């Protein structure tokens, strides 16, 4: 099921090319094993280099081996990958939108040359350590510290829900210093750095999220990202990742809608396919309307991003809408599938479970509501 509004008519030829490439990757490399991988809690690390070879890692960045593609192309790739599984879109987000973006935006030339080409190729993996065990919504309250010791920095503290940390080569770590929040590049082999995968997840099971500890982790003075000062540093990267989610969640929604349409044509109840009943058609129509609206909103935000005018509040509109509606579409799809909808014969429960994570990371629904409330009223309701 592609958009009934002929989305391709609104896209450039190269954008359609990126989308087709990502759909082929998802179809051939992710979908054949994803149900079993989800069941087995298996992250197929061998696909990382293939994603790099396809040009998907840091694809919206310029130079250093990155593809330099437009925002809409990047969004379409996120949509196609997340139509297979949110875990793989998350991988591309953490690597490209968070870790690589941080180095690209705030790093020295030396740091960029050291890390970005290998990360773009999928030879090196990065992670982005911001969220702490006490919660992710208020990074201003972070307890992880970095203190000067001679020419070095010494980091202490804990982070939680850090994607890829146990397989990462380099961690972008946000820590409180005497001069506020700063970012550091910490090779994960540094003594005192420990990453432990969180094992009891019922969502995002085909991807890796970790607890991370810093026990007197010593890095040289030039490990600091000089271009990032204060929380605008990590938030600038979260903007990139949230933008990818605006598109990605619609991919999960499309997959659920596809499953529901297909099943409605074959599942017979009361002597005819349920797709021939008005109740089911009404559900499918409502799901389609929200999917089409979500994709068109994503495209609008993508065009604003390409023009350089996209604001954080506009990203909040997109993230809030896409994930919320994708969850509703997944739930409605499940009802159309009946009891079979709770099995792994269909992708719907897997998407539904994954989307609960997507709803929570990169700013919860409530955080985005408050960002928008502040934009509308000029009044800050966070504290
Ligand atoms: P506030 O006073 O609003 O701002 C502090 C400074 O940050 C700037 N800023 C932004 N800059 C760029 N983009 C944005 N979206 C920005 N939002 C704020 C702001 O201009 C200010 O700069 P400056 O230079 O004046 O200091 O800060 P606040 O503490 O009141 O923030 C409020 C709030 C709630 C919006 C913010 O804290 C927030 O967005 N919270 C949610 C954080 C979040 O999304 N956490 C989840 C991260 S997911 C994760 O860590 C896992 S990574 C994925 C993985 O590994 O799998």
Image: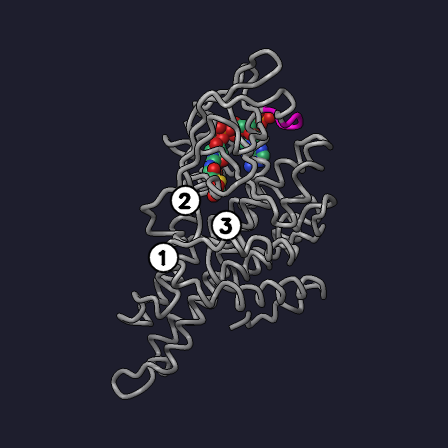
Residue nearest the observer in this picture, 54 or 6: 54
On the image, the x and y values in percent for residue 297 come to: 56, 56
User: Is 376 placed left or right of 209 in the picture?
Assistant: right
Residue 101 in picture, x, y percent from top left: 62, 40
Q: Residue at x 43, y 68 (%)?
A: 257
Q: Where is residue 145 drawn, in percent x and y?
A: 48, 20
The answer to which of marks 2 and 3 sits earlier in the sequence is 3
At a point 46% along the width and 48% down the height, the residue shown is 320
Q: Is the CB–ligand 1 distance for label 3 below 8 Å?
A: yes
Badge 1 crowding class, 10 Å Cα cut-off, few under 14, some 14 to 19, many 20 or more, is: few
Q: Quadrant of the C terminus?
A: top left
Mark 1 vs mark 3, CA separation in Å: 18 Å
**Magenta stretch: includes residue 295:** no
Q: Is residue 294 left or right of residue 57?
A: left
Q: Which residues are magenta?
A: 225-229
Q: Which residue is mark 1?
A: 40
């Amino acid at each position: 099921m592609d958009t009934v509004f002929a989305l391709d008519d609104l896209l450039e030829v190269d954008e359609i090319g990126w989308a087709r490439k990502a759909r082929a990757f998802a179809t051939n490399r992710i979908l054949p094993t994803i149900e079993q991988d989800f069941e087995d809690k298996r992250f197929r690390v061998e696909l990382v280099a293939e994603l790099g070879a396809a040009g998907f890692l840091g694809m919206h960045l310029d130079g250093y081996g990155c593809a330099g593609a437009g925002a809409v192309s990047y969004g379409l790739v996120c949509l196609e990958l997340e139509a297979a599984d949110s875990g793989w879109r998350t991988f591309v987000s953490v690597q490209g939108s968070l870790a690589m973006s941080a180095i690209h935006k705030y790093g020295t030339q030396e740091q960029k040359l050291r890390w970005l080409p290998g990360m773009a190729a999928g030879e090196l993996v990065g992670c982005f350590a911001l969220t702490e065990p006490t919660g992710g919504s208020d990074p201003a309250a972070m307890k992880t510290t970095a203190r000067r010791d001679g020419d070095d920095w010494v980091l202490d503290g804990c982070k939680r829900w850090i994607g890829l940390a146990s397989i990462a080569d380099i961690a972008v770590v946000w820590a409180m210093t005497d001069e506020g929040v700063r970012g550091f590049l910490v090779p994960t082999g540094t003594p005192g750095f420990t990453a432990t995968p969180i094992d009891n997840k019922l969502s995002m099971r085909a991807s890796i999220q970790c607890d991370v500890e810093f026990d007197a982790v010593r890095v040289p003075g030039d490990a600091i990202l000089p271009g990032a000062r204060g929380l605008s540093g990590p938030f600038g990267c979260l903007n990139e990742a949230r933008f990818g989610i605006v598109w990605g969640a619609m991919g999960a929604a499309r997959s659920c809608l596809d499953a529901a349409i297909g099943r409605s044509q074959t599942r017979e109840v009361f002597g005819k396919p349920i797709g021939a009943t008005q109740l089911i058609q009404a559900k499918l129509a409502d799901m389609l309307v929200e999917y089409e609206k979500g994709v068109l909103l994503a495209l609008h935000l993508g065009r604003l991003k390409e023009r350089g005018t996209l604001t954080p509040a506009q990203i909040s509109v997109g993230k809030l809408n896409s994930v919320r509606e994708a969850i509703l579409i997944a739930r409605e799809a499940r009802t159309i599938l009946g009891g079979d909808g709770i099995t792994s014969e269909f992708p719907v429960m897997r998407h539904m479970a994954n989307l609960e994570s997507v709803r929570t990371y990169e700013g919860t629904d409530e955080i985005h509501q408050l960002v928008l409330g502040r934009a509308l009223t000029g009044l800050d309701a966070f504290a």
